[in-house]
Amino acid sequence: MVPQNPFFFKFMVFCLILSLLMTTSCAKDSDLFLEVIEEQTDSGEVEDGDEVSEDPTEPTDEENEPSNSGPLKAFPTAFGGGSNATGGRGKILYIVDTLDDSVAATLHPESSGNDAYYTGGLQDALTLHDVGYIVFNVSGNIDIGVGGTRNWPKGNGQGIYVRGKTVFGQSAPRGGITLTGGTFRIGGFNPDQGNIIIRYLRSRPILNRDGVLSTKDDRKTWAFHFTAVNDLMLDHVSGSFAPDKIAGSAVRQEHVTAPNCPCTNKGQTFQYGLFADGNTGLYTEVNPDRPNNPEKLIDNISYLNNVLISTSRAPNMAFDGFGEVVNNVLHDGQFKSSRVYHDIRLNHLGNYYQRTNGVYSWIGGLESNDVPQVFTRRNVYNGSIKINGYNSGIINLKGNDSEDNTILWIDNPDRDRIADPVHLAATQFPSTVPNPWTETTAQDAFNRLVLKGNVGAYKYLDDDGEVQEYRDSFDMKMLSILRDNRDYNPKVASNWVLPSIPSNTRPADYDTDNDGMSDTWEIQQFGNLDQSYRGDFDGDGYENIEEYMNQVDFH
């Protein structure tokens, strides 16, 4: 018998109505979701140069995720040797408002509550010692001249002296900044040189030391070169068309004994770079038998999450300190992968070698009493190594922890046998770098860098201060070759052509208080335009302009 309780019937009616409402709401939400997906799928054509990233299934790498609540670093996604660089923190802002690098700086003093700032060309931005932050209100190509920065008026033969600077390439409008015409070289004989952060910048020299288009090794022209620089962070850059090497660092025997020296290379990170088509890829090395043993001046060098295409030396590592080569991708290798000597302790972990072409890595002592050592594990490699009578047979490494990776390394200098066991460490070397990168699998590195495209100079902040993506045609071509596992023929002069990129200028209302931050973003974050670029609104140690620029770490 059904109870004749009026409250019971009211309760049942209420449940029925609630059920109908929830069903209708879920149906509407489902329809709305499908409409959004259809709208995104049927959206207009992608404009040339604007990047659309693929998004394969990839495990969440929580230990490497950026966090504003974590330790204060160069920026939230900085790892390895140079990750504690403070760059220009606390110093004056310089707004590069011209593509002519020689335009002299103009100082705009503090007024009406706004901090002082400079405007002008790139040369003074990099060489004025009170400048800390460098932003760009223009996009396009900057010709740094024959021989590059070392031939600038303030050049010193080694490059330019730089201390305490952050170069925000992501600050440029759509198109970004490409340096060309010569080597972007920072170096000299000053022990306090360094503390430098460079992000989202391209360098494609094309011309050799004499200003001639030639793919022959001129032993001088690099895309990025650093000599005796401590605390360096090079992040999300693109480099190519370098007659000598694409990127790296070194010291010379003079850095041991010159006045004011020794001058060291300690604490450097090269991460998320896209490097292709140069005589040599990456390089931190001191040649053997140099007087004064300058190899002892180098320590804590990190090459993390880089992509190298159709180049050799990926990288060479030859010095006496600690080094790490972790989660890089090498495609279409040329000649050799790495050359390792002196007394280095090297971790070689989770790298992905594709279309290997028989590339090999050397390790061995080239000087008496030198015992370089490498711990190599969890790399992906499919191919063979054949040289000087040494034939490895087919190598098929899948990146598993149980696999023997020592077969990738051969004897240096004879190159006719597997490396001597004395050079092949049985256990991983303890990391001595700050904020160490947590190694992922080699396959995850390939997905992250190649399929998702998180590599090279490809992000910028638009006029509203929102993160957008743009990749020039050469970088897009290189990633396409990688994704399709195709060959590329490097060092062909007719291919060394500077990609066409947009040349834009920020509108007048982008940053009316000239503090390097979009007015729109400032009002959203602070409610007004009263905050200094050197302030710290949220008290986390990153200055306001860093918070603005660090948006690229979270989007």
Image: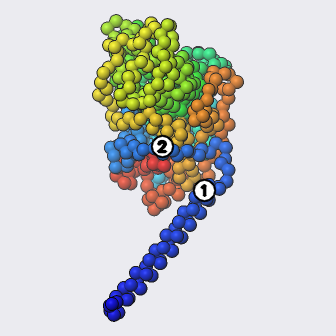
Q: Secondary structure at mark 2?
A: strand
Please state if 534 lies on the left or on the right of 493 as rendered. left
Q: Residue 190 sits in which quadrant?
A: top left
Where residue 76 appears, as percent x and y from the top left, is 40, 43
Q: Residue 187, can we see it? A: no
Which quadrant of the rendered structure holds the N terminus? bottom left
Q: Tell me the crowding category of disc 1: few under 14, some 14 to 19, or many 20 or more residues within 10 angstroms, Cα based.
A: few
User: Mark 1 = which residue?
Assistant: 40
Instruction: Kindly identify the residue that appears in the image at 41 percent across and 35 percent down.
Output: 441
Instruction: Kindly identify the residue that appears in the image at 36 percent across and 20 percent down.
Output: 374
Instruction: Kindly identify the residue that appears in the image at 67 percent across and 43 percent down.
Output: 48
Q: Residue 92, can we see it? A: yes
Instruction: Kindly identify the residue that appears in the image at 50 percent across and 51 percent down.
Output: 517
The CA distance from mark 1 to mark 2 is 39 Å
Kind of residue at badge 1: Gln
Q: Residue 54 sits in which quadrant?
A: top right
Where residue 318 appears, as percent x and y from the top left, is 41, 17
Question: What residue occupies the far front of the structure in this picture?
Answer: 1
User: Mark 2 = which residue?
Assistant: 93
Nearer to the camera, 389 or 521: 389
Kind of residue at badge 2: Leu
